[in-house]
Amino acid sequence: MDNATDHNHSLQVDVILRSADGHDFRFYKYLLSLASPVFDTMFALPQPSLSSSSPDSKDGLPVVELAETKPALQRLLGMYLPDYLEKDGKIASVDEWKEVFSAANKYEMKAVVKCLSWNLESLAEAEPMRVFALATQHGLNEAAQKAAFNTLKVPFGGWGAFPELECVTGGDLQRLFQYHTACGRLASSTLKDWFFKVDKAYCWYNCSSGKIWNGSQYVSNWWQTFTEGLAVVLEKKPLGATVEEGELASKALVAASLCPNCRTIAPADMERFRRAFAARLDEEMSKIVLESRS
């Protein structure tokens, strides 16, 4: 979005916004005034007379120099044009989001701030801790909740350093730790409940070779070893994606291949279990609510 005239011919551009890196955006004062009280106040002030030699004008239009970069202004202004999503799409990185969100707040563009709040949620899966920090800092509780859910992919504290860590308080980290702990406990109980309610057609419940009592019924030895290992991992990473990780299942299937009753059926049954239990686990984890800043 370099020129607003590319999008709307019913209005005449009447201002140039110049980015910090020297790029000019021709736009409409009317739209800017509607979008931003800051611009509305600016344009309401008496304007100096323009001349072709003035550095504050270009092609007979006033030039307003801004502190934002070309990409940030391009995104910010584009959000007020009708084909924004078609041409620009969603913001794809946390760094870009930060720059545009900062500008939207600076110019008090409430509609953009609201849109960016939703957009931040879409970044939570790729960079959950950065999104958690930003969402918590700005009071965006829904984005913080989604980000917290995605932090369950790694053990608490295993995310390493990130730029927004300075924005997070000790209280924020304590609340996230409590969230992880609650999810870990629920994951453990969900796994135990599964054994009482699950379909008994799985091969490890009907195996007549190498069975062991697991507290609710007899199961194959290899299956008991698998579920014990899974329970330990889920305490640290209580998420459906953990169930679908291949390492534990691969080891279990190697052991199952030694069982004359399970070896032909175990791979398909294991895959069926992992899909079903992962979905159930994520459903249960979504019930845990992250406590927000008071």
Image (cartoon, rainbow, N blue to C red):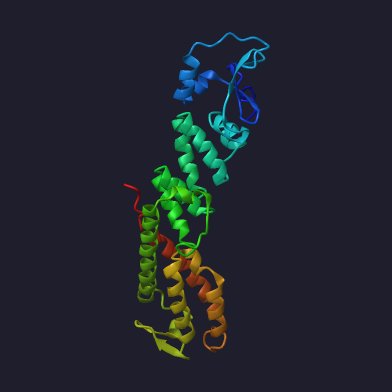
Q: How far across and down, in percent of the image, does residue 190 sit? A: 37, 69
Instruction: Residue at 43%, 61% (x, y): give it.
Output: 282
Give 225 or 19, whichever is nearer the viewer: 19
Q: Does residue 238 appear in the picture of this structure?
A: yes
> Relative to residue 291, is residue 162 drawn left or right?
right
Q: Is residue 219 above or below residue 171?
A: below
Q: Is residue 242 above or below residue 85?
A: below
Instruction: Residue at 52%, 41% (x, y): give it.
Output: 98
Q: How far across and down, in percent of the image, does residue 17 sit? A: 59, 24
Task: Specify the quadrant that holds the N terminus.
Answer: top right
Q: Does residue 263 appear in the picture of this structure?
A: no
Give 40 or 21, whichever is nearer the viewer: 21
| Farthest left residue in view | 294
Q: How far across and down, in percent of the image, does residue 72 sit? A: 58, 35
Q: How many discs mark residues in the rendered view? A: 0
Give 169 or 99, whichever is nearer the viewer: 169
Q: How far across and down, in percent of the image, does residue 191 sit? A: 39, 72
Instruction: Residue at 53%, 36% (x, y): give it.
Output: 100
Q: Is residue 176 above or below residue 187?
A: above
Q: Is residue 287 above or below residue 184?
A: above
| Farthest bottom residue in view | 209
Instruction: Residue at 47%, 14% (x, y): give it.
Output: 44
